Image (cartoon, rainbow, N blue to C red):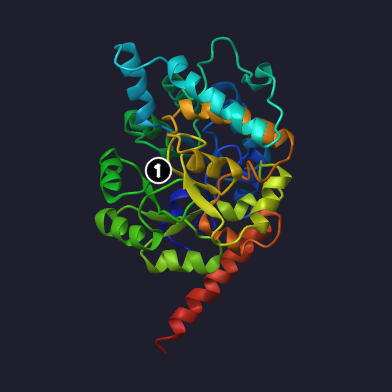
Amino acid sequence: MAMKTRICDLFGIEVPVLLAGMGGASTPELAAAVSNAGGLGVLGAAGCGPKQLREWIQRTRSLTDKPFGVDTLLPASVRRARDQQQAGEAPSPAEQVAPLQGFAQQFMDEFGLEAPDPESLKVTRDPDEPLPLSAEFFEAQMEVVIEEQVPVYVSGLGNPGPWMDRFKANGTKVGAVVGKVKHAVQVKSSGVDFIVAQGHDGGGHNSPIGTMALIPQVVDAVGDLPILGAGGIGDGRGVAAAFMLGAEGVWVGSAFLASDEAGIFDFQKQAIVDAEEDGTTISRAVTGKPARIIRSLWTDYWVREGKEPLTMPYQGMIASPVLAAANRAQRGDINPGFAGQGIGMVKAVRPAAEILREMVYSAEQALQRASNLYR
């Protein structure tokens, strides 16, 4: 493992490969496995309540003595929706969700899903914890991250600027995932230590701009900061390509979804192994924001019926019962999960350490071949 960049020095790691903080999938076990193998494991804590987030951080510390990070979301749209509702400028959550609840039930009836008990969908939380995915929820998560003094924090969506002084006081390295040059410039002005440029190829919430086009433009705009490339990078050739585009490291998600340690269902791991290069689509049917997901009966149904999804977090209230019912029935055709366009390269479920080692080795080989072109 000979690849060394500023990213390695910044985080105190051996190789400049970071596990993307994939919500629910990047668990303490997966994050620790990547950190122990020489990269930087990042917890995908977007859906973790404050209590669970604290438990995840502490469990990660029990599994590794290496640096690790936490990724959460800071969606400005959620804060705007709260402010509009408080000002009486927008409908209440119940008024927005009710019209589409029947649509979700219609889907479950058509595809043979048994609707889950509403009580089973309630997130277990302390009485004083905020409602999941509310503005208060995201703010409470940040308090935990700061109190636990995690080594690295990454904003998977939004700007961490309001918390920057407290992060700096703790010595936490802070980064943000961006999909446009203007967003990179904005977060740089907030004082972040690094930026993840994630292109349209990536799984989950991503950019309208392709990875190959986005990375060099972000590097040109804010290249005095270390830039991580992301989006469809599934093997060492993708890592090498990101370096050629000016990145100093990579943020890799989908390749690690098909790992023993990933916190997703076995049927979802199999869906990744079985998928082809054209198996994903951009849909708002799960979160309300455009996200790359493995194409499914659920994503196709929204297109077929011509329905307009709700904004975040209300679309999640529509999707949650359907996805929970699909999980219980192990229906990979309905809830295969988020993934990027690189999943066509995934051929088997393997240990995370093995995935990382092979990625680094093949990246070194690809870079060596490139250098031979000039001899």
Residue position marked by numbered label 1 in the rendering: 175
Most foreground residue, 290 or 159 = 290
Most foreground residue, 234 or 299 = 299
Q: Which residue is drawn at 25% across and 41% down?
A: 189
Quarter that holds the N terminus: bottom right
Q: In this view, does 299 lie to the left or right of 82?
A: right
Quarter that holds the C terminus: bottom left
Residue 51, image quadrant: top right
Q: Is mark 1 on a helix, strand or loop?
A: strand
Most foreground residue, 107 or 352 = 107
Q: Where is residue 180 in the image (x, y as percent from the top left)?
A: 31, 49
Q: Is residue 10 left or right of residue 61?
A: left
Tally of numbered tags? 1
Q: In this view, does 156 lie to the left or right of 361?
A: left
Is any atom of residue 261 visible in this view? no
Is any atom of residue 305 visible in this view? yes
Identify which amino acid the numbered label 1 is placed on.
Answer: Gly
Categorize mark 1 by other alpha carbons within 10 Å: few (<14), some (14-19), many (20+): many
The vertical placement of 50 against 172, above or below, is above
Q: Where is residue 75 in the image (x, y as percent from the top left)?
A: 39, 32
Q: Position of residue 343 (x, y in %)?
A: 58, 58
Q: Which residue is drawn at 29% across and 44% down?
A: 183
Q: Position of residue 243 (x, y in %)?
A: 42, 66
Q: Which residue is drawn at 73% across and 46% down?
A: 266
Q: In this view, does 145 lie to the left or right of 177?
A: right
